[in-house]
Image (tube, rainbow, N blue to C red):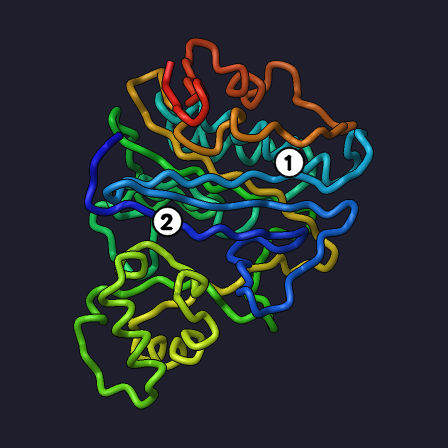
Amino acid sequence: MYQSSERGIAEPTSINVNSCVRWFSPLPDEVGYVLAEGDVVTVSLGVHIDGYAVLSSQTIRVQSSPSPTVGPIADATCALHYATKAIINTLSMGTLSQIQSVLQEAVDTYDVQFVEGSCLRRIRRFLIGQTTIQERHAKVLEFGEPLTEDWVVTPGEVYLLDLAVSTGTGKVKAHPDLRPTIYTRSIPNSQNHANFKLASTRALFTQLTSDNLLHSVFPFTLRQHPEPSRARLGVAELATHGVLHPCPVIIEKAQNAVVVRRTVTIYVRKAGEVVILGGGEQEAKVMWVRSEKGLKQNSELERAVKGEGIKVVELKRVEGERMEIE
């Protein structure tokens, strides 16, 4: 086992249902959502050892009968599956334009939309795209946005593919009623010992700067605090001072839209070979669906999905909890 002074949560677990895209993580004293037959659920989480993070998201559907899902949800699932597979196969040897192209072809083929905020980004030690950190020499491809800088993928780098597909418009907004429960701490602003007015704020600030679980640049949930309800009283003042940045619950703007999402952590071993560290199909099988649409024969997307000449290796479980790479 790798010995490190710091390890833990890189992204708190969130359970996002139907039109919810990310960051829904209710506290123990809050009224939770009761899953119903037919709900589409995305589970997201992340862990790290010594700052090196692996994040993963998988989408499943709640159903009691073993039958395939059909209709728009099936179309969105197929688009997500093929786009993810094509991007993984293209990553180590393709260009950013090719990655954009195969994604666009996937959503056009299945008549769905990718969700705002979907991206491909390089992640490094303690850096997974937090809004509280201005990363130098960042490599980020925001899907649907114009390419402002053309960069290349280099062997030895790790990338996070965060892709969500919607049956609606793909436009998002913060939930109007649900309060954030996940926050990211600004390290620079934490150095300013402001004269906080509330005792609960001062107590939370002390906890943040002394507890290893909360003393991190990674997002954390108020559930990690010994008294979540008390911690909630202090977050507003800390957010006002810029010490904490909330991660609001994000939902699709279109009513009755359903979002499917997948997050994959990819290590580029060399040109033509990548390793899936998290979010692979070994973790959870792709939801059983049946779509009337399909890939166009010999299209750019179909060729990328086949990935001829590309080797994709995935962590697999052996002997209980131990994992290994082929």
Question: Mark 2 Cα within 10 Å, few/some/many (few <14, many 20+)?
Answer: many
Q: Position of residue 315 (x, y in %)?
A: 42, 23
Q: Position of residue 260 (x, y in %)?
A: 62, 43
- 303 with respect to 197 (left or right): right
Q: CA distance from mark 1 to mark 2?
A: 36 Å
The image quadrant that residue 139 belongs to is top left
User: Please, what is the three-letter code of the amino acid marked with disc 2?
Assistant: Ile
Q: Residue at x 52, y 24 (%)?
A: 282
State the SS at label 2: strand
- 37 with respect to 275 (left or right): right
User: Please, what is the three-letter code of the amino acid marked with disc 1?
Assistant: Asp
The image quadrant that residue 89 belongs to is top left
Q: Residue at x 56, y 23 (%)?
A: 301
Q: Position of residue 81 (x, y in %)?
A: 59, 30
Question: Mark 1 Cα within 10 Å, few/some/many (few <14, many 20+)?
Answer: few
Marker disc for residue 187: none
Q: Which residue is mark 2?
A: 9
**In this rendering, is residue 64 above or below 127?**
above
Q: Position of residue 217 (x, y in %)?
A: 28, 56
**In this rendering, is residue 234 above or below 268?**
below
- 67 with respect to 181 (left or right): right
Q: Residue at x 26, y 57 (%)?
A: 212
In which quadrant of the rendered image does the N terminus lie? top left
State the SS at label 1: helix
Q: Residue at x 38, y 79 (%)?
A: 234
Q: Earlier in the sequence, mark 1 or mark 2?
A: 2
In which quadrant of the rendered image does the C terminus lie? top left
Mark 1 touching mark 2, by CB under 8 A? Answer: no
In-front residue for pair 242/54: 54
**In this rendering, is residue 95 above or below 11?**
above
Marker disc for residue 108: 1
In-front residue for pair 249/100: 249
